[in-house]
Image (tube, helix red, strand yellow):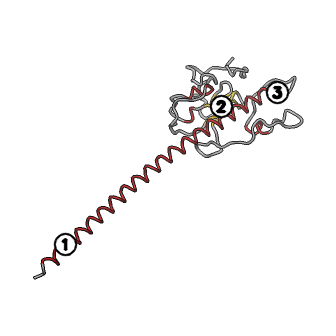
Amino acid sequence: MRPLHKFSVSRLRKVGNGFMLLGLLIVLALGGLSLMAAVDVWTLQKQREREEQLLFVGNEYQQAIRRYYFAAPTGTARVLPPGFEALLEDDRYPIPVRHLRRLYPDPITGRTEWGEVRVGERLSGVYSLSESQPIKQAGFPAAHENFKDRSKYRDWVFAFGGAQRLDNPANSTATSSLTGKPSDELVTFSVPTPLGKIK
């Protein structure tokens, strides 16, 4: 027969080891939850940063298109650029003029491809091709207040004047750069006025 004290010590050791193991598992679980929460916060922060980059880059394209339009040489008609390259090298002058420092990729998708807004064959604006839902739903600057409550990044349209989207011309709608809201019917329009309204 085992001595009582030896039995008790052995049993207490087993119980103690069990509690230590349970405590370790709890600590690991809590650590995992904390790590997941940290990853979620980091992911959210990165998305917010990409949204701010999209607002900056989209505005850069919009302003470059506007500058191209108003930079028409004396005696020539004001026209929108034929494409992105014309923003980098406006060859309407003897010495090419740059309206955009470089071609920016889409901060949301990470790709160089953009949705294009066109007036006829001319580039009037850009928008992201992302179908993701924006985090930012309010608090936009006045120039982009029409982005409020939009369900997709592709609804953030950075356009100078109104135009059709190339991705779905059959169902496209005209958009005003001031309101950013699709009209009920597809309308025809001329080149933008200085305020970007549809004539």
**Residue nearest the observer in this picture, 174 or 3:** 3
Crowding at mark 3 (Cα within 10 Å: few <14, some 14-19, many 20+): some
Residue carrying label 2: 117
Residue that appears at 75% across and 38% down: 100
Quadrant assignment for the N terminus? bottom left
Residue 166, picture quadrant: top right
Q: Is residue 6 shown above or below 165? A: below
* Mark 3 and mark 2: Cα distance apart in space: 20 Å
Crowding at mark 2 (Cα within 10 Å: few <14, some 14-19, many 20+): many
**Residue nearest the observer in this picture, 144 or 167:** 144
Whether pointer 3 and pointer 2 mark residues with C-beta atoms closer than 8 Å, the reply is no
Viewer-side label of 3, 1: 1
Residue carrying label 1: 11
Q: Earlier in the sequence, mark 1 or mark 2?
A: 1
Residue carrying label 3: 72
**Residue nearest the observer in this picture, 95 or 129:** 95
The picture places residue 170, in percent across and down from the top left corner, at 59, 29
From the viewer's perspective, is 165 left or right of 101? left
Viewer-side label of 1, 2: 1
Q: Earlier in the sequence, mark 3 or mark 1?
A: 1
The picture places residue 136, in percent across and down from the top left corner, at 52, 34
